[in-house]
Amino acid sequence: MTDQSEFERQWLQTDENGGGGDGGEPDIKAIREYAYVAFDQLDKNGNGFLEREELMAVLNTPISEREKSFITFLLNNQENIAEMVQEEQSGPSEGISRDDLESYFALIAALLG
C-alpha cells in the first residue's frame, strides 16, 4: 500500500455507519482541525515551523495509524505546503508554518468545491 492510499484510507469521510462518504472525498475539515491541534505538539523546538526532523521524530513514537498517515502526508508534501506563504520571519526553508497549512487547506477545499 502506498503512503497516499494509506492517507486516503485513514482520512476519508465516513457516514454514521462508518462507511465511506459521498465520493470518498478526504475530510478536509477533520484534517485541518487535526493539523491545528497537533501543530504545537509537533513543533518541538517552538520556532513556529514543522521541520522534517521534527516530523520524522514523531514517526518513531507510539502514535495511531491515523496520526502516522497525517505525518507521512506532511513529509511527502512538505515542499509544496511550505511554499504556500512567504513568511516575514526567517525560518527553515522547507519548514511548514501555520499560515502555510491554512493556505494549503484553503486551496484544497476550493479545488474540491
Image (cartoon, grey):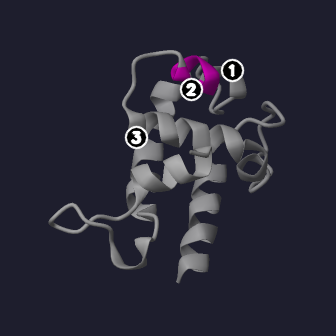
Q: Nearer the viewer, residue 54 or 1?
A: 1
Q: Nearer the viewer, residue 72 or 100?
A: 72
Residue at point 78%, 32% (across, down):
91
Residue type for callout 1: Glu
Q: CA distance from mark 1 to mark 3?
A: 20 Å
User: Is there any visible trace of residue 37 in the rendered image?
Assistant: yes
Name the side, left or right, on which 24 lies relative to 16.
right
Residue type for callout 3: Arg
Residue type for callout 2: Asp
User: Is there any visible trace of residue 98 in the rendered image?
Assistant: no
At label 3, counting other C-alpha atoms closer than 10 Å, the crowd grade (few under 14, some 14-19, many 20 or more) is some
Say above or below: 67 vs 108: above
Residue 111 position by quadrant: bottom right
Q: Position of residue 84 (x, y in %)?
A: 75, 56
Q: Is residue 93 magenta?
A: no
* First in residue order: circle 1 vs circle 2: 2
At label 1, counting other C-alpha atoms closer than 10 Å, the crowd grade (few under 14, some 14-19, many 20 or more) is few
SS category of the residue bearing label 3:
helix
SS category of the residue bearing label 1:
helix
Residue numbers of the magenta segment: 55-59
Say above or below: 27 vs 97: below
Mark linked to residue 66: 3
Residue pointed to by mark 1: 53
Q: Position of residue 96 (x, y in %)?
A: 68, 40
Mark linked to residue 43: 2
Q: Position of residue 15 (x, y in %)?
A: 23, 69
Residue at point 45%, 45% (across, down):
36
